Image (cartoon, rainbow, N blue to C red):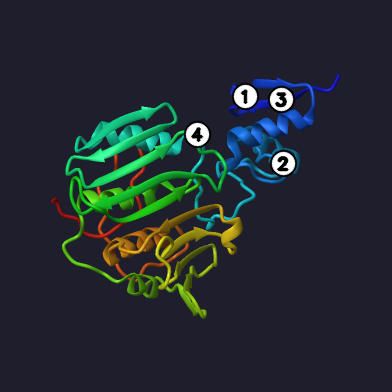
Amino acid sequence: MRRHVHLHGENHLRQVSTSYDTEAEAVAEFHRLYSVAVRPGPAPLTDLEQVIRRLLAGKPPTTVRETSAPATEPPVAEPGEHEAFLAALFDKDRQWERYRPVDETTIASHESLTVRAEFDHEARHRTDVAWTIAEYDGPVGERLWHATLTTGTPVPLIHTILQYLDAPPPTADHPDDVLRDAAWHPASHPARTTWAAPDGTIVFESTPHAVADRWTLYRGEDLDRAAWTIRLSAGVPYDLLAQLVGTAADLLPSLTRPTTRSLPAPIRGLPAAAPTGRARGR
């Protein structure tokens, strides 16, 4: 009888995590659990498999990891990265307080009581909203603006938004200036303006007449099939948009930045976020 399994780990540490009677059951369950990470085609070769393949081909082993994805492809958050970021946020930044009103939701409330970030632990699919972030004009005031971020959003972008809300920069930049300096390509449409990264992998879209989704940042050529999406409502400060698109530009390793941007303090246990400019305490 043919066996269908989920494997975990690499090389000699690889283990069977779950087994299934049919291929359809295995694929359906994997997609339910890890839809953000699902990619078509065979799994990437492990380090040991790469070494064996090179030896069989008569080539010397290499320590460089071989992957099917190009080196310049912007990242997508893997399962568990958002959970680790959230835990590190509470561990390092004492100005954020944790609330867990229900099992599937954690709320991070800033000590100023004007900023709130909600994280959905059950978000799995690439179109699911994992984060909802909002700023208010007072502890019991009206909402000024809000943003939603899907499950694949890279952690540096989430870090950039929360860092700005905790310590906004003393001077304001305009997002168009940041994107122009980074050599992104603008295009005007009847109802919107888009800026595309030099390789077309990340797009920033402005819809000036919209309220809920005034600005959209996403990875992919098509918004309907984007690997991750950040939507921001009207009212978002331009300097926050500038910080955000600057971080998105810095996610492209092949990009040559014309200016040097200062690096924010990373959250302990996580890699440093992409450069996001100057910051000050409130």
Q: Which residue is mark 2?
A: 42
> Can you say whether 46 is above or below 153 in the image?
above
- Asked if the residue under mark 4 is in contact with the one under mark 3, i.e. CB atoms within 8 Å, the reply is no
Q: Position of residue 219 (x, y in %)?
A: 52, 58
Q: CA distance from mark 2 to mark 1?
A: 16 Å
Task: Give neighbour class at mark 3: few <14, some 14-19, many 20+ (Cα, 10 Å).
Answer: some
Camera-side residue of 253 and 34? 34
Disc 1 element: loop
- Which of the numbered marks, if any, corresponds to residue 14? 1
The type of residue carrying mark 1 is Arg
> Which residue is painted at 43% across and 62% down in the image?
213
> Which residue is painted at 42% across and 51% down in the image?
148
Task: Give neighbour class at mark 1: few <14, some 14-19, many 20+ (Cα, 10 Å).
Answer: few
Q: CA distance from mark 3 to mark 4?
A: 23 Å
Q: How many marks?
A: 4
> Can you say whether 74 is above or below 197 in the image?
above
Q: Which residue is mark 3?
A: 5
Q: CA distance from mark 3 to mark 2?
A: 14 Å
Which mark is in front, 2 or 4? Answer: 4
The type of residue carrying mark 2 is Pro
Among the two numbered marks 3 and 2 on one chain, the one whose residue lies closer to the N terminus: 3
- Which of the numbered marks, if any, corresponds to residue 122? 4
Q: Position of residue 46 (x, y in %)?
A: 63, 35
Q: CA distance from mark 1 to mark 3?
A: 12 Å
Among the two numbered marks 3 and 4 on one chain, the one whose residue lies closer to the N terminus: 3
- Asked if the residue under mark 2 is in contact with the one under mark 3, i.e. CB atoms within 8 Å, the reply is no
> Can you say whether 229 is above or below 200 in the image?
above
Quarter residue 232 falls in: bottom left
Give the side of residue 52 with respect to residue 241, left or right: right
